[in-house]
Amino acid sequence: MVDSDISYFFDENCNGKTDDGELPFPGDTVTLDAGESACMVLAFQVPVDANKDDKMGAQLRVSAHEGTGAPLIGKVTDTGDNNDSADDTNGDLLTVTNNAVLDLEKTATPIEGTFKESDADINFDVNGDGSIDDAPVNIIKYEVTVQNDSITPAKDVVIFDGAPEHTVVLPSGTYGPQSFNINSLQGDTPVVAVDDLADEGTNIDLNQDGVDGSTEADIGIDLNNNGNTTDTDPISGVYAVKKELSVGKVGVTFHVAYDPLKVPAETDLVNIAFACADLNNDGNFDGEGECNDPDPTTSGPDTSNPTTNPSENNSGGSITDTGDKGNDPDDDTNGGGDDDGSVDGTQTITTVPAGAEAYFYNIVTNLGNKADSYDLVTENDLTNPFPAGTSFSYQNGTGTADLTDTNGNFTVDTGLIDPVTCLEIDSSTTTVAGTNIELTCNQKLIRVVASLPQDGGSKATESLATTTATSFNDPTVTFSKIEKLESITGPTVDVANTAITSIDPATNIDDAASGVATTFDIALGESKEVGIYIANEGGINDSFTLLAEGVNEGDMVPDGWSVVFKHNGIDTNADGSVDVAASGEIITATPNIGPGSVMHITAVFTAPADAAKALADSDQVGAVNGNAASGDTDLDYIISIKVSSNVTGASDRKLEAFDVESTSSVDISPDSLSGQAENGGSEVYPHTLTNTGNTTEEVTLGTSDSGSGDGFTSIIMVDHDNDPSTPDKNIALLCADGETEVLAEQADGSVASIEIACPAGTLNLEPGEEVSINVQVQVPPEAPEGYKNNTTITATGSSAGASDEAIDTTEVVNGDVTLDKYVGVSAGCDGTITGMFEKDPSNGPGVKPGECLVWKLIASNNGLAKTENTIIRDEIKSGVETMETASFKSCRLSETAPGDVIDSSTVLDPALQFICDPQGPSADANYDPATMTISFDVGDLESGDLYVAEFMTRVE
């Protein structure tokens, strides 16, 4: 057969025939859009001289272009039942016969209307969920006719039809099956609806092979037209039997139904009716064209034209709050989970800070049977709106990406969501990362993000907005829910001594108003490192100024104390671990830290080394006892840490207490003096008593003399009228004379009232207080020349370890010659002194290493007779001083040479009115470096004469 003998027709009603109006197709190309299908009929004439058993074949070749403009090989799949299984071709075989020829024709008509399972005229569990309820139902009516086109009758004609995949036959009632021209009185079997058409043992031998099959594979026929014969689940269907069919038509009518929410949209519901019969009237079913024909190229069954009905395109959906499964375990500050815990159409967040991004979880569910995307719009409530300036945006469920317009209509949407029918394949759930929210395959979690204005401040009343989702497939389908924020807190920050792992603006850890956060023990001069934590509980990135203050806001840090802050890392999610490494640098403000982040700071508190500024019992105004619970009784120093934002004004303070360790100490200076006195005379030694500790001391003063057994005595004199140059009161007589205080000038020029504790006569010295004392040593009349008496001065405080002593040495001279020693500082080591000479041969005035001391030794003959062979000696301190050997000077002031007398205002001793001016180098001087001894050979010293020796030492 050649191509010119074959005609192509568009079979518009797909009934397998060329009906009126269906014209031959011109050309050889047809264009089909994606998803579109077309029915075609190949027609050719059987020659009039054809003989029985002649065979005629036709092969339809189809090639797809796939947009290339040229045919491509192997792109068309052959899925039909024909004599050619190769792709791109379809083979048909016609056999000329004088047997009965059955012609099956089928129509499919969708029933218009809205139906549900529970309708009285349906009342059937269509979707197989075990209940008859209000599930939606779509119905298709099938009409099958069979006629014999031959003069030979067909006997035992079995007509059967299976419901298309996804559908079931309605077995009874208004939509139950019916048959025509099939009469049980004639031995026919009228149409029967069955639950499992393949169960031949229960129903009828469909393929007339004499074997009762139970599955499609047993029968070898694709009963539900899903492209295979491997189904094992029951397939509902109908069958009827016409005992004999000669002329005329017989047929059956039945209805199938399906739940549109169980069938993907636009699924092709394909149906073909089948018939098996004894076509040659031999009483068997294995003849040519019969269903048990061993020749697969000619065997039955006879088939109707296929009918195809796409399943309904159904759009629907919902948008819901997350209810009790929406509480986000990883975020307790700015939303996500539904804080009211109930599915009520409202996603509730209790509170967020101003400027934050509050996000509301929403579950969008596709309840349609076609994949769909949903446009999103959130509108502020008119009565209880979010603050002016709030903007709304959308993110995926994990917050890792913004939602965009995926369907091309210039509106942000959810992105494609699988249809509800996906549950028929997989009904399991998956948990959204970072939440405890479980979703099915037709659901998607989104975040509606409300970005609050930074300057919006706090708001105690609720804020509402409505989020609406609109189906892209069917814009008439919309659904909405409420976003609810119960309150907005103002910008807050929290500073604490413990790691902050929960961001809660309503809770202020270590609040200054609640008192001291932590009390630390600290020693004089010690630095204490303290970890502090600053949580940004506001809604924006922020930097916070760091400030150390006193007890009250605005107070200065106590005098002498210092605080510095060091960068110790940033915890970006308040889980207690550092995410941004510590730099260790000293800072005065935090870097920008995000909402919910915690800055780790090391604060270094340093106590003064000066005991007067770090008292064991603090004198700070407002000081408290931070260690009272442990039995401590003294007050502590209070330092507060204040953090504040220059952007939002948020601030917080906490208080630290520092309990300074007690350091008890008193000092007598200088620690030694020396002088000369003649028999029966006396020598006075000036000293200063100072409380150098940080505790108040009741100081007991006393003296003892090494020569007490030989008659040496000593007393301590104090000034009681603020004339430190003339201590004038024996300390032992203060209480007896009714004295209660000693007025003493301090180093800074102030005058302190030193309390006298009677009857003991002790001096009550506060830390840093000092008092001038004179130790007066009395030499007995009979003391021999050269005798040395050591007077030990002791100061004993009321605290353990608070004691000191000094030793004054008095040498007895033979009545006439006395020696006085003075010292002055020469900062430039040029012999010119700074200030005035002082009678302090032990230490001298304050001197720095590298400066020099000028020593002046004055020998005077106060007797009536000349002294002979007089020598002046002195030693310098090893390791402390070095001798300036070019500095030796001397002069002699004689009554016989008054011209040598000069007026001197450089000597602080009223008894010395005039001295001579030493000149150098002195011929009388001799220095022994081995013993570090300097001597001046005075020789004879006439009555009334003075000899002045001078030398200079450099302080190491």
Image: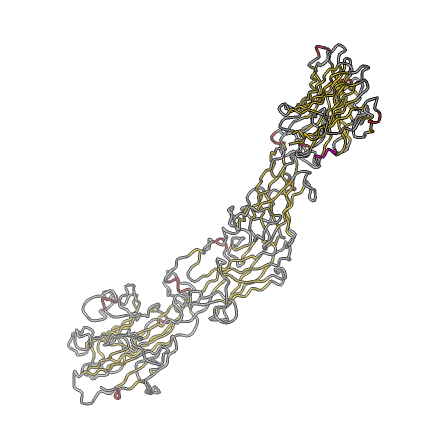
Is residue 830 shown in magenta?
yes
Pick out the residue farthest to the bottom. Answer: 48
Residue 339: x %, y % from top left: 54, 53
Question: Is residue 205 in view from this perspective?
Answer: yes
Hey, which quadrant is residue 35 in on the image? bottom left
Residue 431: x %, y % from top left: 43, 55
The correct choice, above or below, for 466 with respect to 950 in the image is: below
Front-most of residues 222 and 711: 711
Region rendered in magenta: 829-833
Q: Is residue 305 left or right of residue 112?
A: left
The correct choice, above or below, for 446 with respect to 843 in the image is: below
Q: Is residue 737 left or right of residue 170?
A: right
Front-most of residues 896 and 909: 896
Residue 519: x %, y % from top left: 61, 36
Pick out the residue farthest to the front. Answer: 923
Hey, which quadrant is residue 722 in on the image? top right
Front-most of residues 615 and 709: 709
